[in-house]
Amino acid sequence: MANDNAPIQFPNIPPKGPNGDLLLAAERAKATFDVKSLTKIMYTEQYLKKMDKVLDVLENDPAFDKSDRYHHSRPEKIAASLWKDKRLIELTKEHNWDEEEVGIANFLYDMSTPFTLHYSMFIPTLKNQTTDEQKKLFLERALKHHIIGCYAQTELGHGSNVQGLETTATYINETNEFEIHSPTLTAAKWWIGGLGRAANHAIVMARLILNGKDFGPHPFCVQIRSLEDHTPLPGITVGDLGPKFGFNSVDNGFIMFDHYRVPHISFLAKYSQVKPGSGEYVKPPNAKLSYGTMVWVRANIVLGVRMAIAKAATVAVRYSAVRKQFVDAANPRKWDNQVIETPVIDYTMQQYRLLPAIASAYACYFTGRDMMRLYELNQAEMAKGNFGLLADLHASSSGLKSLTTTMAVSTIEDMRRACGGHGYSMFSGLGMFYQDYLPNATWEGDNYILTQQTARYLLKTYRNVVAGKAVASEYNFTVNYLLQYLQNPNAKCPATTGADLLNPELILSAFGFRAAYGIAKTAELIDKQGHSWNSMLVEINRISRAHCQYMLVRTFIVSLQTDERFAKPENRDLLKVLRNLASLFALYTMEQELGEFLTSGYFNSEQAALLKQQVIALLEEIRPNAVALVDAFALPDYYLNSALGRYDGKVYESYTKAAEGEPLNKQLVVEGYEQFIKPLVHDGLNPAGAQAAKL
Amino acid sequence: MANDNAPIQFPNIPPKGPNGDLLLAAERAKATFDVKSLTKIMYTEQYLKKMDKVLDVLENDPAFDKSDRYHHSRPEKIAASLWKDKRLIELTKEHNWDEEEVGIANFLYDMSTPFTLHYSMFIPTLKNQTTDEQKKLFLERALKHHIIGCYAQTELGHGSNVQGLETTATYINETNEFEIHSPTLTAAKWWIGGLGRAANHAIVMARLILNGKDFGPHPFCVQIRSLEDHTPLPGITVGDLGPKFGFNSVDNGFIMFDHYRVPHISFLAKYSQVKPGSGEYVKPPNAKLSYGTMVWVRANIVLGVRMAIAKAATVAVRYSAVRKQFVDAANPRKWDNQVIETPVIDYTMQQYRLLPAIASAYACYFTGRDMMRLYELNQAEMAKGNFGLLADLHASSSGLKSLTTTMAVSTIEDMRRACGGHGYSMFSGLGMFYQDYLPNATWEGDNYILTQQTARYLLKTYRNVVAGKAVASEYNFTVNYLLQYLQNPNAKCPATTGADLLNPELILSAFGFRAAYGIAKTAELIDKQGHSWNSMLVEINRISRAHCQYMLVRTFIVSLQTDERFAKPENRDLLKVLRNLASLFALYTMEQELGEFLTSGYFNSEQAALLKQQVIALLEEIRPNAVALVDAFALPDYYLNSALGRYDGKVYESYTKAAEGEPLNKQLVVEGYEQFIKPLVHDGLNPAGAQAAKL
C-alpha cells in the first residue's frame, strides 16, 4: 500500500453560503449595546490586560497546546498534564506571574491536572492547620515543589459522612509515633486527585486514637512515595483508580495503609494537639470563623458557574447563528435578496433553549459577586463580634452552591444538545467539558445533602418568625419574605397583563411567597402532623431550591437597581438589555416551577397563560443581542477549544480541519484490515465466493 | 527501579459489613411476588433459554471479553470492534444461530461496531429498494460479507432537512453513468457509521439530476474502497470524523466525491427508475405503506428504551441497597442487633429518584408491546384497504419515540448520579452507556422535530372534532379524549383524598383533559389569534409530550386490566405490584408536569398537595420490591458490565479488582516522572534546595 500514511485532506472548497463569518458579523451588527463596556464592567480593564498577556504566552507554548486534547488516551492525558504542570511552574518564574495571572493560566488551560490538588487543597491545608515547625517542614517545601501533595479524605465506603471515616491513626506512646491503618477494604482512601501517580505526600484524614479512645477524624501529613525514586513506601498500597466519566487528566487514586508508622510531627497541630509521650488530647478552640471561609469558597463556585454556563452558551449561541435548517415558509429569511435556510437561532424553540442559559450566566455573575460582598461584610462584622449575618449567609451559600452547580451541569448538556448532531462531536468542545465539570455537583458538599442544611435553617427561621423571635432586617431576606407571607398567607398575584409580570416588585413578591409557602407547609407537616425528616426529603430539597431561586432573582434585580455603574447615562442601553435578561431569568424560572407557584395559590391559570406568552415575548426582545451577550463574556477561542463556537464563525472549515487530524486517519487502511476484513472480502474475489456476484 | 511492572494488589480484607451479598439477599427476601414469573411473562421461556445459550458462548470467547472495555483508547476500540464483527460471523455459523440469537448476542455485547450499519441499514435498504438484478449484484454479496456497506445520507450541513441535501448524482446520457459530486464543503457526507474505516460500499443519498432537472434525493449503491487492498478509490476523500462524546467503537466517517462516476445500475431502482440513454424519470408508485415500517422501527425503539432504563435502574437500585450512608437517627437500621448505617435506598429522596425509573421501564415495556400489536393490526387493516388507523398510529409513534428516548437519556444520567461519587467511575457501567445511548435522541427523527409532526396531527384532529367530522372510536383515543374535553371544558377533578388519585379512570381523565386543554389552547392561539407556527414551537413540543404521556399511562393501566396473563390467580401478587407501579408512573408524571395539570383548571391546590403525599406513600409501598423489580428484567452481569450493579452485591471487591487493572498501574512509577517530577523533587534533596527543609 504505497499510499500508507498519506494524510487525508478535504478539498479546498467553501461551505454552502452565506458563511458563518458573514452571519456572525450580521448578528453583531444588530446589538443594541456596547459589548466592550459590559466586558470591562464584569472583569475590569486591568484583568483583561492580564488575560491578554497570559493568553499570548500559552498560545505559543507547546506544553499548553490543545490541538490533541480530544484525541488523547488516558496515559497520554496524564503525561500531557504533568508536562503542563512543570511548564507552568517555569512560566510563572519566567514571566514573574502573580497569583491572579497563574489563576488565569489555569482558567484558560481549562483542564485539571495531577498537581491541581497540590495547589487547591494540600498547600491551603498546610497554611491553615500547621504549627510553625510544621510550616517549615511541609509548607515551605510544598511551595518549592520539593514535595508534591494531595488531600486524602474520602474513602471507598464514606464520602459525605465524614464522621464515618474508617482509617485510624493510633498514637503509640512508647515511640511517639502514629500508626496509620486501613482496617477494612472500604477504608481505602478513594478519589484522591494527584494521589494515583504524582504525589509523594498526602494530607490523610484519619480517626485519632489515643490510649484506646477514638477522637474522630483528624488531619496528618504523611509521606507516601520515596523522594529518591518515587516508589511507594513499604506498608502502602497506592495507585490510580481507573477510568472515569471525565477528569481523566487527573490521577485520582486510592491508598491503603498497613500499620504504617509516621512521626509525631505528622499530626497537624494548629488546632488540636496530642501531648508527646502521654498521648493526652488538647482540644481545639471553637472555630466558628471557618464557616466564613466556606462562604468564600462557595461564592467562587457560583462565579465559576457563571463561566461554565457562559462557555457552553457561547458555543451554542454562535453555532446556532451559523447553522441553518429548513426554510421557515411563513417568514423566509433572505440574504442578498435570496431566500436562505433559516439560522436555527431564529426558531422560537431554539431561543427557548439558548436565551435562558445566557440569562442564568448573568444571574450567577451578579449573585457570585454579591456573595463576595456579603462575605467581606460578614468577616468585618464577625471581627467586631457580630455573628448575626453568618447563619443566613452560610445557609444561602450552601443552597446556592447546590442549585447553581446543578444548573450548570444541566445547562452544559442542554447547550451541547442544542448544537444538534454536531454537539456530539468532541470538537464541539462541550462533551469533555460536561464530563469534566460534573464533579462540581459532588465536591464541596454533595448537592442533595447540602439542601438539607439550607432547609434546616429555613425551617428554624420560620419557627422563630412565627414565635415572634425574628424581626425584619436590611440583610436577612429570609425573615423578610417569611414575615410578608405570614401577614397575608392568602395573598394573590395582582397581574392582569403580561407586562405586569415584568414588575420587579411583583416578581420578588411571587418568589418570596412561593418560598415561604413551601417552608410553612413543610414546617406544618413536620411539626404538627409528625412527618419524619426522612419522609419529607423531597419537599426539603424543594424549599432549598425555592429559597435559592429567590436569592438569584433578587440579587439580579437589585444589582441592576443599585449598582452605580449601570446608572451612568452611557450605559443606559446596556441596562435595558440586562433588565430584559433579569426578567427572562425570573419568568423562565417561574415557568419551570409553575406547579409550585400555582399550588401556593399566589398565581392562577390565567396568569400562568400570561406568563408563558410573556416568556416568548422576552425571547423575541432579547434575540437581537444574543450573540453580543455571549461575546461580552470575552472567552477566547483558545479557552473554548470548539470548532462550533469560534468567534469568527468559520465552523465547517475548522471542523473538517479537526477531523483531518483524527489519528485513525493517519493510515490509509485501518489497522485490523488484514485480519478481520480482508478474509471476508477476498473470499468474494475467489472464483468460488465470487460466483454469486457475477451477473 | 526493581519493582517496576509489579502489579498493584489490594489486601485481601473484607469491606465494612454487612456486605453487599447479605444486604441484597435480605432485599430479595422482602419481595411480595415471584420474580421468575414476571421475567417469563416479559420474555417467554424460549427467549430466556436462547439468552442463556448465547450468553454462555460469549462469556467464554475472548473476542467478546469486556474486561478492558473501559480502558480502551479510540484505536483499540475500533480494533476490538472489528475483531468482534468477524468473530460474530464465525460464531453464528458455528452455532447455527438464528436471527433472534444473533440479536441477543449483539444486545449482550452492548456496543455498536463498524459493521452495525451494514446489518441495520445497508442490507435492509438493499432488500427494500433494489431490483432483482441489483439484489444479485449487491444484496447477495452483502449477505456473504463479500462487500461491507454503510448508509450515507446525513451531510455536514444537512440532517433533518433531507430535501436540503447537497450531494448531486448527475446522469450522463452519453455514457449511461451517474456522476456523484460534492459541490461544497457542507455537502460532505458526515456521521456515517462504518464509513470511516470499514466499509467498501455505501448507499449514498444524492440529488438526482436528469437532463438538467433536479429530482431531489435518491439512493445509490456505490463502491468507495478497493476490494483488493481497501484503499479509497480515486475521486473520493473518505475518513473517520474523529472523537465523539460516545459511540467511539464505531468509525463514523465522512466522504466527499469529486465528479465520481458510477454505472447506471448503482441507482436503486425498485421504486423510481431512470431510463438508460434518455435519462427519462419514471415516478415511483405512491408508497403510503412505508409509514407502517416506521411504526415498527419506533415500537422497537420504545422496547429498547425499556431495556436502557432497566439497565440503568438495575445498577442504581442494587447499589443503593448495598451503599450505606449516615445513621438515620429517627429510625436506625439494625443488623444482627447492631445499629448500622442506613442503606441509601431507605432514604425517601433516593426512592424518589429510583422507583419512578423502574416504573418507567415497565411503562415502556407495555407501550412498546402494544405498539407492536397495533402495528400488526394496522398492517392487516391496510392490506384490506383501510388506512383509518395509520395517521393516529404514526403520529403517536413519532411522539413516543421522542418522549421515551428523551426519558431514557435523562434516566440513565439520573441513575448514574444516584450512584453518588462512584457513579462517576467508568466501572459503574453507566458513564459509557449514557454516552453511547445519546444518539437515540437524534437518529430516526430528531426528538424536537418529531414532536412537530405529532402536534400537527393533534391540531388537525382537534379541528376535525370541533367541526364534528370525527367520531369516537375503539382505537383512536385522541378523538375520544378531545370529545370528552369539549363536552365539558370546565370539568374539575373529583378527588378529595390521596386514595382517590389511584383510581385508573380518574388518572386517565386527568391526562386526557390536560392533553386536550393544551391542544385546544394552542389551536386557539394559532387559528383565532393568528400566532405563527414558529412562535408556538414551545407549546407544540408540550402538547406532543402531553399526548404521549397520556398514551404511556393509558397503555400501562389498560394492559394490566386486559392482559389475561395477569388475570390468573397465581399472578395476583404480581398484578398488585404492577398496579402500584402504574400508579406511581402516572402520579409521578403528574407531579413533574404539575404546572400543566393546574393550569388546565382540572386540578386545584389541595389536590396538588394530596398528589405529592400520595407519591411518597406509593414509594413506601413499592420500596420492598425494588430489587425484585429490577431483578425481573434478568439482565446478566456480563451485559451490565458494572462493578456497582452486580447481581451478587459484591460491589467493593469487584470495584477494587477493576481498579487494579488500570493500565497506569502497570508501572510502579508514572511515565513522565523522570522528566517532570524528579527535577522538582530532587532539587529539594540537593544541599541548596534542601536547606529550608532542615529542621
Image: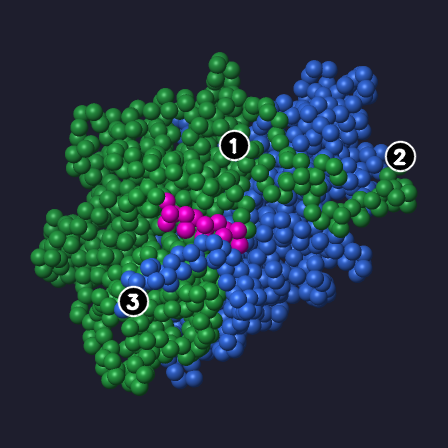
Chain colours: A green, B blue
**Circle nearer the N terminus (1, 2):** 1
Q: Secondary structure at mark 1?
A: helix
Image x and y of residue A237, in percent: 47, 71
Q: Which residue in the protein does label 1 denote?
A: A654
- Vertical placement of B602 versus B283: above or below? below
Label 3 and label 1 in one chain: no
The C terminus of chain A is located in which quarter? top right
Q: Residues within 10 Å of mark 2 (few under 14, many from 20)?
A: few
User: Which numbered mark, 1 or 2, is in the foreground of this view?
Assistant: 1
- Chain assignment, label 2: A
Toward which corner of the image does residue B177 lie, by quadrant? top right
**Residue A328 visible in image:** no
- Chain assignment, label 1: A
User: Which numbered mark, 3 or 2, is in the foreground of this view?
Assistant: 3
- Residue depicted at x 23% and y 79%: A275
Image x and y of residue A153, in percent: 36, 66
- Residue depicted at x 50% and y 23%: A19
Q: Secondary structure at mark 3?
A: loop
- Amino acid identity at mark 1: Ser
Q: CA distance from mark 3 to mark 2?
A: 88 Å
Q: Which residues are magenta?
A: A75-91
Q: Which mark is residue A141?
A: none
Q: Nearer the viewer, residue A497 or B81?
A: B81
- Residue depicted at x 21% and y 69%: A271
Q: CA distance from mark 3 to mark 1?
A: 54 Å
Q: Which residue in the protein does label 3 denote?
A: B694
- Vertical placement of B642 versus B570: above or below? above
